[in-house]
Image: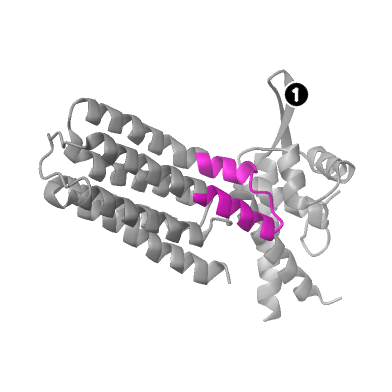
């Protein structure tokens, strides 16, 4: 998956993936259930989008145990932050150029 | 499909997600008004019934136990009302009241508040009763200030006002109960009404 012709990254074309990135941009770490709640999606749907972003190395995973129960938390990687910021810049430019 | 419309929509969604996932926006304005009313009632009771109005830092008023009981009742009522009305508010917006955002809000609010609460007990044990009302304002203000990052931004100003009132009350001990009444009573009602009319209608 790469940048498409207009400079927008393909990974951000989907609104759920964009939502995951937006939430992680302002939160250091979020667990699966919090993300699910914010985005209002099913487990499977969210998991597959997380996998896509993970493959792009845009988000990282941290596995810990809370009361011996596994707890997975996601965070934005430096690479992901840069891609997200670039994406915002392009969006901004597209809107500006239309005015 | 219209492209720029599309991108505008995207930006709007990004913004809303950032806000929703980092700030708890279901704080109830009415709860603020109620808290103010409890505080006014509490202040009126301790002033008229128990003659409580310390004019020096070290003092031991006669009916101190009743005064403290009143203060604790005001606090429990105010916090209880805030929790119940905020949960109701969140339900109306079809959000969960207990999520990562509200948890963070609560932790950031609770840490300064507990520090203040323990300090109150220490002051009481040393008979520094005159400092209790203004110090409670200061610590409440700090708690609000630190929680403001996770809810309405203007809670910050509410916190700053309480801190200023607390410091004023510490310097002019004879006006400390008045400062407390203004801070917890009047300011709460004003801010609560502002929240209510700005965001809840």
The reply to whether residue A87 is in sight is yes
Colouring method of the image: one colour
The reply to whether residue B18 is in sight is no
Q: Quick check: B88 above or below B2?
A: above
**Is residue B91 rendered magenta in the image?**
yes
Overall secondary structure of the magenta section: helix
Q: Residue at x 18, y 45 (%)?
A: B170
Question: Which of the pair B165/B18 is nearer the observer?
Answer: B165
x and y, in percent, of residue B142 in the image: 36, 45
Label 1 Cα crowd, 10 Å radius (few <14 / some 14-19 / many 20+) = few
Quadrant housing residue A46: top right
Q: Quick check: B29 above or below A95?
A: above
Find the residue positioned furthest to the bottom. A99
Residue named by callout 1: A70
Q: Residue at x 29, y 29 (%)?
A: B121
Question: Which of the pair B23/B11 is nearer the observer?
Answer: B23
Find the residue positioned furthest to the top. A68
Q: Position of B172 compared to B90: left or right?
A: left
Q: Quick check: A45 above or below B17?
A: above
Q: Circle 1 sits in a helix, a strand or a loop, which is it?
A: strand
Write the start and end of the magenta stretch as one range: B81-106
Label 1 chain ID: A
Quadrant housing the C terminus of chain A: bottom right
């Amino acid at each position: 998956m790469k940048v498409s012709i207009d400079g927008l990254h393909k990974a951000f074309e989907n609104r759920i993936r964009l939502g995951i990135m937006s939430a992680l941009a302002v939160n250091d770490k979020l667990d699966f259930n919090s993300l699910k709640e914010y985005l209002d999606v099913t487990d499977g749907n969210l998991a597959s989008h997380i996998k896509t972003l993970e493959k792009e190395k845009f988000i990282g995973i941290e596995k810990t145990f809370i009361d011996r129960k596994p707890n997975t938390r996601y965070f934005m990687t430096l690479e992901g932050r840069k891609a997200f910021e670039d994406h915002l810049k392009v969006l901004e430019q597209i809107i500006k150029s239309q005015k | 499909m219209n492209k720029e419309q599309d991108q505008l929509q995207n930006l709007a969604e990004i913004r809303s997600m950032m806000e929703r996932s980092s700030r708890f926006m279901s704080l109830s304005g009415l709860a603020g008004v109620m808290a103010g009313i409890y505080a006014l009632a509490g202040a009126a009771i301790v002033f008229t019934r128990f003659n409580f109005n310390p004019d020096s830092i070290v003092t031991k008023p006669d009916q101190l136990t009743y005064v403290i009981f009143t203060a604790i009742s005001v606090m429990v009522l105010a916090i209880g009302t805030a929790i119940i009305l905020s949960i109701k508010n969140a339900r109306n917006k079809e959000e969960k009241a207990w999520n990562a955002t509200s948890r963070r809000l609560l932790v950031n609010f609770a840490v300064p508040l507990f520090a203040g609460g323990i300090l109150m007990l220490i002051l009481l044990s040393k008979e520094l009763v005159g400092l209790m009302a203004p110090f409670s304002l200061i610590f409440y203000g700090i708690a609000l200030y630190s929680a403001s990052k996770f809810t309405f931004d203007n809670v910050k100003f509410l916190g700053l006002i309480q801190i200023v009132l607390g410091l004023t009350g510490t310097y002019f001990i004879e006006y400390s109960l008045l400062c407390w009444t203004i801070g917890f009573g009047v300011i709460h009602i004003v801010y609560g009404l502002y929240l209510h009319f700005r965001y809840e209608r």
